[in-house]
Image: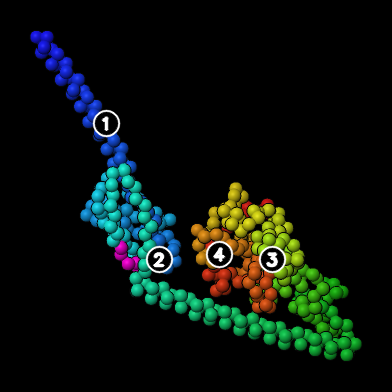
Amino acid sequence: MYFLVERINSFQIVMKRLLFTVLLISTFLGAHAQSTGLEGIVSEVDSSNNLSNAIISIYGTTLITESDDNGFFSFDRNVPVGDQILNISKDGYEEQFIPIDLGFGQRVKLNVALELTKKEKKRRARLVKDLKKSEKKKAKERENAIEKARKAKKKEDKRIAKEQRRALKKGNKVVVVYEPMTENPPSNESVSLTEKKVAVEEPYLINNKDEQLKRKYAQMMGVSMDDIRNIRLYEFVDEWIGTPYRMGGHGKEGIDCSAFTQKLLSGVFNYVPERTAQTMFNGGRDEEELYADVSAIRTGDLIFFNDTASEFDEITHVGVYLEHGFFVHSTSNRGSDGRNGVQISELESPTWKRKRVAWRRMKMKN
């Protein structure tokens, strides 16, 4: 009897040890199985831009996912171990099949680059060609309109000068007024029809500094004088325009883009942004979100640029939007006069449209 009891106790001890060992092995394998996974980034071969909405699946399984806005994808649950085939596809790109080997506890990271199909390459090339053709046509039309306006102004200036000379020969006094004449003028400064004096309805002889400023920048941007509204802004621009570009500079002897932007915002809008283009782009508590569509852009908004037009690359240039499709900035690029520095440029010009990343509106005090 004693011997039987001892045998039973020994059996129980062995079973407990066996159960503990099985539990330990299960825990170890479970922990490793849970950490087994697969993740990666999908990008484009030609541009290196990350691709969203790419379809990624593990061949022969029901596992399938989609890349997010940053091109990222991952498989974290029920990932089979061993040799697998990863399938990546997206409309307009060549489909890829990638062999992978997943072991227990292993997490594989991949960088997948998809190449455009020949059909998509041709389509994009055609779009670029059509866009360049359209931009060239618009630029030519604008040049013609500006030239036509210049000729009309020159002709009108000659007519006014001729009228003035004719009036002076007759001994009449020349009076410049800015309102249409009436038969019953409200003051002695207006001109009646019977005095035979010359009246100029358009302010070609301008003594008012604001009016001169309006006329200068209206002609530069091809708009009417009434469309130049923020005199304080254009006074600042007029003070700095033509200042040469200098990297790291912040004075009249030379200034870079971020320093000029900082001076303009503080001098005109009573707002002091960050010092560099990148930190202005990164934003802070006083800035609103970034926008790509320029249809809602308005005076005082910041515009950011780099060589790739990608928000994921370093921002290398910044300017301030004026109005009517123009912005002011300090650039190392040479303008039509052959000089670099502070200048006014068209936002939709091929050079700057190709480099434009986004724009941001500051919460200004004024």
Distance, label 2 to label 1, CA atoms, is 47 Å
Q: Which residue is mark 3?
A: 246
* In-front residue for pair 273/86: 86
Distance, label 2 to label 4, CA atoms, is 20 Å
Q: Secondary structure at mark 4?
A: loop
Say whether disc 2 or disc 1 marks the residue closer to the N-terminus. 1
Q: Amino acid at mark 1?
A: Leu
Q: Which residue is mark 1?
A: 24
Say whether disc 3 or disc 1 marks the residue closer to the N-terminus. 1
Q: Amino acid at mark 4?
A: Asn
Say whether disc 3 or disc 2 marks the residue closer to the N-terminus. 2
Q: Quadrant of the C terminus?
A: bottom right
Give the class, few, some or many, for how many residues have Cα within 10 Å of label 2's Cα (few <14, many ≥20). some
Residue extending farthest to the top is 1
Q: Position of residue 338 (x, y in %)?
A: 67, 77
Q: Secondary structure at mark 1?
A: helix
The kind of secondary structure the magenta stretch mainly shows is loop
Is residue 311 in the magenta section? no
Q: How many marks?
A: 4
Q: Quadrant of the N terminus?
A: top left
Distance, label 3 to label 1, CA atoms, is 69 Å
Distance, label 4 to label 1, CA atoms, is 57 Å
Q: Nearer the viewer, mark 4 or mark 3?
A: 3
Q: Position of residue 289 (x, y in %)?
A: 54, 54
Say whether disc 4 or disc 3 marks the residue closer to the N-terminus. 3
Q: Which residues are magenta?
A: 92-96
**Which circle marks residue 45 in the picture?**
2
Q: Tell me if label 4 and label 3 are in contact, CB under 8 Å.
A: no
* In-front residue for pair 75/303: 75
Q: Position of residue 308 (x, y in %)?
A: 51, 66
Q: Amino acid at mark 3?
A: Arg
